[in-house]
Amino acid sequence: MAPKVLISDKLSDAAVQIFKDRGIDVDFQPDLGKDKDKLAAVIGDYDGLAIRSATKVTDKILANATNLKVIARAGIGTDNIDKDAASKKGVIVMNTPFGNMITTAEHAIAMMFAVARQIPEASASTHAGKWEKSKFMGVELTGKTLGVIGAGNIGGIVCDRARGLKMKVAAYDPFLSEEKAKKMGVEKVELDDLLARADFITLHVPYTDQTANILSKEALAKTKKGVRIINCARGGLVDEEALAEALKSGHVAGAAFDVFKEEPATENPLFGLPNVVCTPHLGAATTEAQENVALQVAEQMSDYLLTGAVTNALNMPSVTAEEAKVMGPWITLAGHLGAFIGQMTDEAVKAINILYDGQVSEMNLNALNCAVVAGIMKRANPDVNMVSAPVVAREKGIQISTTNQGKSGVFDGYVKVTVVTEKRERSIAGTVFSDGKPRFIQIKGINIEAEVGAHMLYTTNDDVPGIIGTLGQTLGAHDVNIANFTLGRSTAKGEAIALLYIDGPLPEKALKDLHDTGLFKQVKELEFEVG
Ligand SMILES: NC(=O)c1ccc[n+]([C@@H]2O[C@H](COP(=O)([O-])OP(=O)(O)OC[C@H]3O[C@@H](n4cnc5c(N)ncnc54)[C@H](O)[C@@H]3O)[C@@H](O)[C@H]2O)c1
Ligand SMILES: O=C(O)[C@H](O)COP(=O)(O)O
């Protein structure tokens, strides 16, 4: 059945066409996102949800999203998505980090000009036939200092355009290196320095715990008298009440805001104040940007739903379509290795160590790690997948470490997983043969070569005669057919293992009969998700 996608915000028609062309069922309901009850009622039908900023994807919506695999934001900010809840549920969250960056940077520059020359008020006055030529005295931008808070994709473009306007640019961004700042032709400064020196301040940071209220009452008090402040990033970065006071007192000469603490904003402390320019979250509102983000979202979602390729995800490592093809069998193997150990382990896991050898060590290890961890966690929580597994592991305090090494043995590459618990360490290794099928190649240091089946039986015993006969006879007596029988032993330890691929589940009585022979140290039925 074709995957089903819901578009619950206003998105260019181009997205709808792409979904159709790629064979995806698409429901375009651009106003649904504003009605959270209706959205919650229908979300269970969909594999994908495409949104902008109007749809709020809360934990309540996610609780009903029983089939949802991907949420894609046609734009940059994902603060309208409960990403923790999505990750825990195993839903990938994607955005389109580059599609509207130029457009938004241009809006910030336009807002800076508008507030420097009071263009909106002058325009309204002229429309009213007042011709107030002496009322609207402005300031030049040339030679002025622009303080940029957040010099990422949009902030970086703003810096570039401001330099073109012959402004001096000072940037505050703890994650900006001196080298990059030099290349951009901007001065990297501390926040207090920026506040003290800037004639214009523009914000381009995401809304996080660290950036919330970054221009607080105290920070505003440190700004230069006559400063003008532009916010085209996110509401809540600036204390709107304190800014309104600073505007009224004349300390701040003007403000240009595209984003507000409460949106849609129908009331705000800044509304109605002189020399405050406001737009209704129009930063990304150009035909070019909307076309870009719509196309990207539809392609990214279709790729993921149809091929497993992951692009621009915030809670999952990227995997290209090519990688998805090459890595597919290795991801399956990684899941099986995890599932084997997960089913063998009854006590709390403390650490997971994963060794990548040979060809596989050059692949996208993040994605493989997620598959191993998901395989292990599934035993305790069947809903865990590659997206949610690392979150669940982190919550449980499980340490995950990886080692990669060049080809060291007879296989072109292999993966070995070791799980450490309070009581013991357990390990299993596997590889992918040239037929694209995963094989288990080592269990607790004992070499074997076992195909993976949906139903398997694992036994350990002293290395003595009679085991194969007992296994064959007991399973035969319970009408269980053996598809594949693999043995291995450690002569040093006098220990042997058997891994049997059987045609169906093992009756409880068969397990009991095997136990009752007294020949086996361990008898464990295992299940694997095989395609
Ligand atoms: N108004 C609009 O319509 C509109 C459109 C697009 C994007 N946005 C918003 O613009 C903002 C920036 O987007 P972007 O694409 O440039 O993001 P980005 O991730 O490329 O850049 C953000 C920058 O902020 C920096 N940063 C993070 N924490 C910081 C902190 N505590 N102090 C200082 N700097 C910090 C990061 O190092 C990064 O360089 C986002 O909030 C986004 O949602 C708004
Ligand atoms: O983060 C973004 O991309 C902007 O805030 C744009 O939001 P919008 O797509 O809802 O206009």
Image: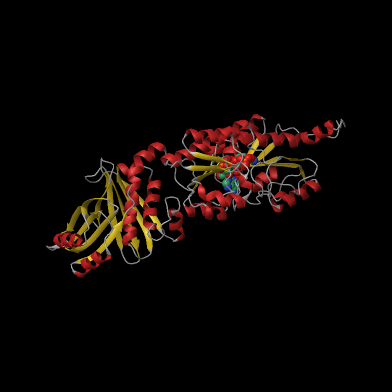
Residue 315 in the image: state x and y as whole percent: 48, 48
Q: Vertically, is 341 above or below 52?
A: below
Report the quarter where the N terminus lies: top left
Q: In the visual, does 327 lie left or right of 469?
A: right
Q: Residue at x 23, y 46 (%)?
A: 409
Residue 13 at least partly seen: yes
Q: 420 and 248: which one is in front?
A: 420
Q: Vertically, is 473 above or below 191?
A: below
Q: 299 and 395: which one is in front?
A: 299
Residue 416 in the image: state x and y as whole percent: 30, 52
Number of disc labels: 0
Residue 383 in the image: state x and y as whole percent: 43, 55
In terms of image quadrants, where is residue 293? top right
Q: In the visual, does 218 lie left or right of 368?
A: right
Q: Vertically, is 187 above or below 131?
A: below
Q: Which residue is the extreme one toward the left?
A: 465
Q: Quadrant of ligand 1?
A: top right
In terms of image quadrants, where is residue 226? top right
Residue 171 at least partly seen: no
